[in-house]
Amino acid sequence: DDPLRCLRAYRFSSQLGFKIHPETIQYIDKYKKLLSNVAVERVQVELIKLFEGKYCSENLEKMKENGLLFQIFPELEKEIKVPPNLHHHLGLLDHSIETVRQIEILENTMPAWFIEKLNSDQANGIKYISLLKIAGLLHDLGKPETWQIDEEGRHRFIKHDEIGAQKAVDLLKRLKFSKNACKYITKLIKYHIYPSQLIREDEPATEKAIFRMFRKLESETPDVILIAMADRLSARGPEITEDIVRKNLNGLQQFLDIYSKSKEKVESLPKLLSGNDVMEILEIPVGPRVGAILKTLKEAQISGDINTREEAIAFIKGLEFKNNK
């Protein structure tokens, strides 16, 4: 009578930790295909609640086993074909579900200010943690399309992050997610490997590179770092030693600590120039360029290069000179 109950069973299990009765599982197996007849908006509501639950990952695993997962996310079925490799001890789909599980484990180890954000509403009663776990499940959506095996037998997935973000847009639109939710999830997918790319064995990331990352990721910086941590913990192939994992997690934790301190510093910094000041001094119109200049100025303040209004004026004029040149 209402095929949405097939999904609602897993939503209840995710939120409450209950086990689904074997007879109910039989009904789900029999009627799961009728879920396509249900209004997408109703499916989305159940999905959001499922991902918000503390037992989400184990229910995603069960949904994978009986195929209900592919009724909702048919794009994920392609991930079954990508096997474990030197970097990943799990096949791609299992790795994606394991990433969600690691997010659930890591969530409560985060700083209080970050936990508060994760449990706050992104929009319309939808919590950040729910959307972040959806991003965790979809973070490697671009891998099946970019999968190559080189002459040495290594698996390559060049630009899978960018392609995955693009593919996620259509998926999220189909499920009627809002523009803001779509923007948030796709940003996390697009940049999920960015923080780890800054961690090098030979030398630590420079302050300039770190703050460039903060400027690019903006308020989603800690969210992307959490995805990167979960991704690292979900990939334990034969070439990934405990030392590699430890160094990566330590580096990511350091980024999170620097972000937290810079966030506190930003809130206490005086406002040296306004948007109107920038437009008047540089004689430029309203537009995104003004915001970009103010962000660069704020970064210089955080690093201690700029401390007075006079220094700020000279700084943005220098930027203007470089841009014109």
Image (cartoon, rainbow, N blue to C red):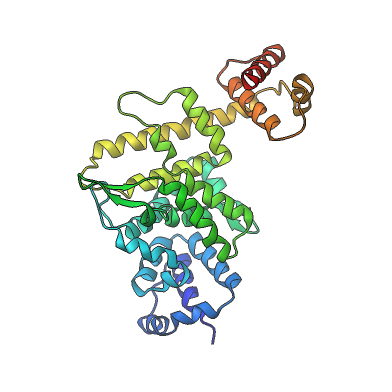
Image quadrant occupied by the N terminus: bottom right
Tell me what residue is drawn at x 51 percent, y 53 percent.
166
Inspect this view and state whether residue 228 appears. Answer: yes
- Give the x, y percent position of residue 155: 27, 49
Tell me what residue is drawn at x 30 percent, y 58 percent.
82
In the image, taking residue 244 as reference, residue 103 lies left or right, namely: right
Q: Residue furthest bottom?
A: 1
Res. 270 image quadrant: top right
Above/below status of 296 relative to 106 = above
- Give the x, y percent position of residue 80: 32, 63
Residue sitting nearer the eye, 165 or 260? 165
Above/below status of 20 relative to 237 = below
In the image, taking residue 224 as reference, residue 86 lies left or right, namely: left
Q: What is the tally of numbered marks visible in this picture?
A: 0
In the image, taking residue 22 as reference, residue 14 lies left or right, namely: right
Res. 113 image quadrant: top right
Image quadrant occupied by the C terminus: top right
- Give the x, y percent position of residue 49: 53, 64
Tell me what residue is drawn at x 55 percent, y 28 percent.
262
Inspect this view and state whether residue 108 appears. Answer: no
- Give the x, y percent position of residue 215: 56, 32
Residue sitting nearer the eye, 236 or 9? 236
Tell me what residue is drawn at x 54 percent, y 42 percent.
220
